[in-house]
Amino acid sequence: MAAAVPLLSCRNVGKSFGALTAVNNLSFDVGAGEILGIGGPNGAGKTTLFEVISGLNPATAGEIRLAGEDITRLAPEAICHAGIARTFQLNAGFDSLTARENVQVGAYFGRENRAMPTFRIGAATKKLADEALALVGLEASADRITGKLPVLERKLLMMASAMATRPKLLLMDEPVGGLTAKEIDRVMQAVRTIKAAGVTIILIEHVMRFLVQLSDRVMIMHHGEKLFEGAPGNLVNDRAVVEVYLGKGASERLKSFMQAAGAVSHG
Amino acid sequence: MTPIRRDILIGLICIAVALIVPFVFGGRYVVTQATVFFVWAIVVVQWNLVLGVGGIFSLAQMALFAIGGYATAMLGFYLKVPMLVAIPLGGLIAVVAGMIIGLACLRLRGPYVALLTLAIAQVMYVLIVNDTGCFTNVSGCMPLFGGVRGIGQFGDLGFRSLFPSKWYIAHYYVALGLLALAFVFSVAVIRGPLGLAFKALRDSPGYALSRGISRFKYQLWIFAVSAFFTGIAGGFYAVHFRVIGPTVFSFSLLLFLIAMIVVGGMGSIWGPLLGAALLMLADEGMKEFSDYRNIGLGLLITLFVIAWPRGLAGWFDRLRALRTSNPD
């Protein structure tokens, strides 16, 4: 469970678009070094929760704290500087720039608010960007134009540019959506490398195999509220989760997969 | 050869050629036209920062040029400021005006930016032209901004008295020097952190925000940096022609300059310069068809936007890509 002062703490967070409540009275903590996996049916409010935390679409209720500091009303660029980076469900990127330049954007602008931009990007920033590219194994594609990269590399590039901002917390929105099994393994490897670098991670994913293998803790959302929160092993035994989200067949398959992996708890 | 070395080499060759032009074509007409070309080249190279690199469809560039020119002229006329001081001051005043225009456009996107900036330029034009009240009577009745006739007799760089018959050659070199400075400045911006921020905001504004780029801040920067040399070009233009008047707001001139950028290649480093050179030459060659000038420019812009949206610079990029993919 979370440490004494959680890295991220959401208290009664809500987001309404007029009469539509996308996230409702949601409270949870994420401890430093942890991976929290978020699942749930389409429209459950998972991505909206990321929009709220990252400031692109601020909360209409509640409070979000990063290492004790209130970040609920900060602008997205200030939240980035505070130490939260994010990847997107759709393959966001600066399409006309090279992969290396994409990561340099994160390395140069993502770490601190620059009152006055310097004249040159600087060797230190360039080195940090190249290290972030190497972290996800994209050195070979560094000089290619982002818009022409294949899907897997675009997803890895988003992770690299997020890492270049030196985040404390990384929010990943469906990092393996639309990838093949082999590609999923590559992303999984990258996520483990990022965790080993000491970054706390929240990931949203529909691919349950990916979610349960990586997460220390899982939260399932439904209609903007928390349906389940606990160890991944308890997921398949939770009736509400099976009924609302997984379904009988998928939960059985997941159970046998996890038993094979030796992760499921009995009871 | 790295792209930067290639740019430096091409730049040095261009400057070397430009330096000997007045000795080869000593005629006043050629030298004066080349000087005017340098002025327009400064404007399009800076405009390209907003339009091409930043992807913001601002049509305010000639308004900023006018602000630089009018500021220079008025400082000289009313306050007797020497031109060597008034021209840089005009550049700074254009920077402030540029930032205000950037602020006004902050919440607008795409064609709405074009509409607002064009409206700003037109309002300035109408206010200047319709002002007929006498602000001063020193040398005949003159409105504050000079009205239809513009402002004259505000000073000079001193070359006319220094070289009574060859002053225009001195102006040629001044304009060349300004263009070289403005061009180096624009390359530094494009290749530096500011250019990275502008391109990031152009490609994906939301993603840029989430990587720590403040749209507010860098939109003001983009208008500010592109205004400085534009304002200076306006000041030099006023000094060169010894008058600044509302003709600089003309729509035909605006079209001419946009065509230079579109034909050359929006967002590229050399494109606007190349486009400016080609269009000046084409315009020169087709003087007798001047009645159809605007129609021709319109057709040319349409052709390039549809067929070659990346302009002539795009052609060169494709050629280079072909060469590197067949290394034999």
Image: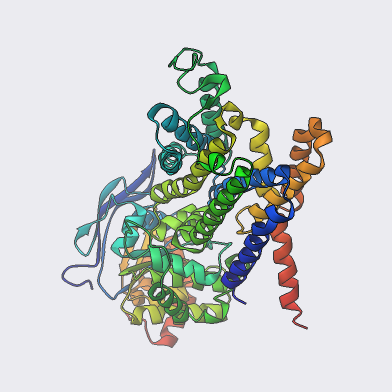
> Where does the image place residue A27, in percent across and percent down from the top left?
26, 58
Q: Would residue B256 be seen by someone viewing this image from the given angle?
A: yes
Q: Please give left or right for residue A242 compared with residue A97 in the image.
A: left
B265 relative to A188 in the view: left or right:
right
> From this viewpoint, is residue A175 visible?
no
Residue toward you, A248 or B317: B317
Residue A32 located left or right of residue A159? left
The residue positioned farthest toward the right in the image shown: B288
Give the quarter of the figure containing the C terminus of chain A. Answer: bottom left
Q: Residue at x 32, y 50 (%)?
A: A24
In this rendering, the answer to whether B110 lies above or below A23 is above
**Residue in the picture at 40% in, 69% down:** A107
- Left or right: residue B80 versus residue B319 is left
The answer to which quarter of the image holds residue A32 is bottom left
Q: How is the image coloured?
A: rainbow
Image quarter of the N terminus of chain A:
bottom left
Up-down: is A46 above or below B6?
above
Estimate the x, y position of residue A218 in percent, counting from the top left.
35, 70
All told, the count of numbered labels is 0
Residue at left 62%, top 77%? B1
Q: Residue drawn at (68%, 61%), measured in percent from left and top?
A: B17
Is residue A27 placed above or below B78 in the rendered structure?
Answer: below
Q: Quadrant of residue B253?
A: top right
The percent coordinates of residue B137 (x first, y second) are 45, 14
Residue A162: x, y in percent? 41, 68
Pick the residue in front: B279 or B295.
B279
